[in-house]
Amino acid sequence: MEERREGKLYYLGEEVVIESAKVDGKPQDGEQKEVKMQGEEDVEDVWPSEGDYWAGSLDLRRSVTGWCMFLGISLISWKCKKQSRMSKSSMEAENQAMSTASSEVVWLRHLLSELGVAIISPTMLHADNTSVIKIAINPAQHESTKHIEVDYHYIREIVADHLISKFLLFDHRYQFEGGCEIPKEISNLIELELLSLAVNSFSDSLPMEIFKISWLRIIDLIDNNLSGSLPPNMCSILPNIEVLYLANLTNLVLINPHSISNCSKLKILELANNKLTDLIPNSLGYLTHLQFLNLGENNFTSDSSLSFLTSLTNCRNLTVLYLPFNHLNGMLPASMGNLSTFLRKFYANNYKIIGRIPNEVGNLSSLLDLDISGNNFVGLNPTSIGNLRNLQRFNLRNNKLTGFISDHICILQHLGDIYFGQNQLSASLPNCLGNIASLREIHLGSNKLSSIIPPSLGNLHDLVVLELSSNKI
């Protein structure tokens, strides 16, 4: 029987799914884990490596090294190969795999440099074998490592050269069960740069010892049973912090939400599904390097002008903005049209926002996904929607929009999915919808549409859903 498992990496709003399989309880060759590299201009590389199934080869008892490397979400290099020598321990097998993957990382970094791609930050090599991690970071030798000293010296030297980062990863495949606490001794890893303990069963309170590791750049604690508050002086203790993944915790408290705004290097802030309360602070606008912000599924509030959106116009690199399922009552400000020109995803659904959709939304020319469903918008769709030439998904479901569907929507030649159901739209469907060849789904049910279905819809060869129920067609 085949069991499928998924590991997810969320970064810059994109989701990379890495799947592995087990057959009859034995891992397949080449099971992988992730390594990330980030440089300028949204360059994101994922470099998985694994010394899989120690001594898994029945004939020679050799382990298998497998890795695949991504540029953004594009696979550019991969290999799965039996190791050249037998390993006396799982630690040695992992060490060989890391050494091989590290060589490829160094080569590709040089290649990207030759192609003019600036890679400033070290590559973050994720690993779950604590012995290998300690050897890679600590230059001290002892007898147990003499037989693998070439590999470990190589890894340690490229760590020292800042080509890869110091790391600690325990992902969902190595779950800690039974209410295990995060050990306080973790603070002894004073040079740690990446800490990922996501999707485990860690419980009790957030250990303050984590926030004493001043070199940390990335903290990932998603999906644990942790509670407590972030230290109000966190940003001064962690001056290098760039990424905070703190979603789906049991009881996270922000005693002073404004304190996060002091993390001047922060690029990713993930606080979804924590039942957080209080006003969304306008001081988030001080995070000028912010690229990804997820505050969804909390109990946040705001003033009637949603002024925090105006403050976020200072975040000129913002790419993804998720705000759904909060208690925000007010009107979308015209200033939202001044949000980052790099903004690709904007989710403000299920808010009960009132008023009209501001015409300035058409300034967000890079938008790929716009979801403002489940609100109380009234009036017509603004004609400026036609300026969103890159839009692929448009969700206005469950509002109080009236009038007709403008022909301006037909300008959006990359549009794949339209969700306009449960409104009060009337008149006929625009005949030009049949000219949007990329359309796959059209949801227009529960409106007041009339007339006939345009024959031009027959030109949509990729259309899989046409939902027009509860209309007068």
Image (tube, rainbow, N blue to C red):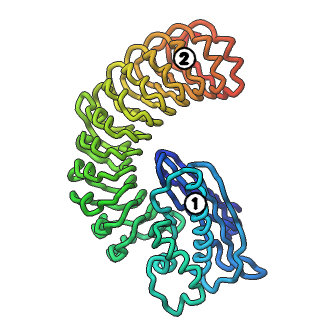
Q: Is 456 placed left or right of 376 in the picture?
A: right
Q: Position of residue 146 (x, y in %)?
A: 56, 90
Label 1: few (<14), some or many (≥20) within 10 Å? some
Q: Is 248 placed left or right of 16 in the picture?
A: left
Q: Which one is nearer the viewer's eye here, 71 or 361?
A: 71
Q: Quadrant of the N terminus?
A: bottom right
The residue lying at 29 percent from left, 60 percent from top is 239
Q: Position of residue 252 (x, y in %)?
A: 30, 55
Q: Is 96 placed left or right of 124 in the picture?
A: right
Q: Is residue 112 above or below residue 311?
A: below
Q: Residue furthest bottom?
A: 143
At label 1, the amino acid type is: His
Q: Is residue 370 visible?
A: yes
Q: Which numbered disc, 1 or 2, marks the residue that appears first in the sequence?
A: 1
Q: Which mark is residue 110?
A: 1
Measured Cα–Cα span from mark 1 to mark 2? 60 Å
Q: Which one is nearer the viewer's eye here, 170 or 179?
A: 170
At label 2, the amino acid type is: Ser
Q: Position of residue 287 (x, y in %)?
A: 31, 46
Q: Is residue 357 visible?
A: no
The residue lying at 49 percent from left, 91 percent from top is 142
Question: On the image, numbered disc 2 is attached to which residue?
Answer: 470
Q: Is residue 259 above or below residue 440?
A: below
Q: Quadrant of residue 399?
A: top left
Q: Is residue 447 above or below residue 166?
A: above
Secondary structure found at label 1: helix
The residue lying at 27 percent from left, 60 percent from top is 228
Q: Residue furthest right?
A: 59
Q: Position of residue 38 (x, y in %)?
A: 48, 54
Q: Kindly indicate whether the residue at mark 2 contacts the one at mark 1 (C-beta within 8 angstroms).
A: no
Secondary structure found at label 2: loop
Q: Quadrant of the C terminus?
A: top right
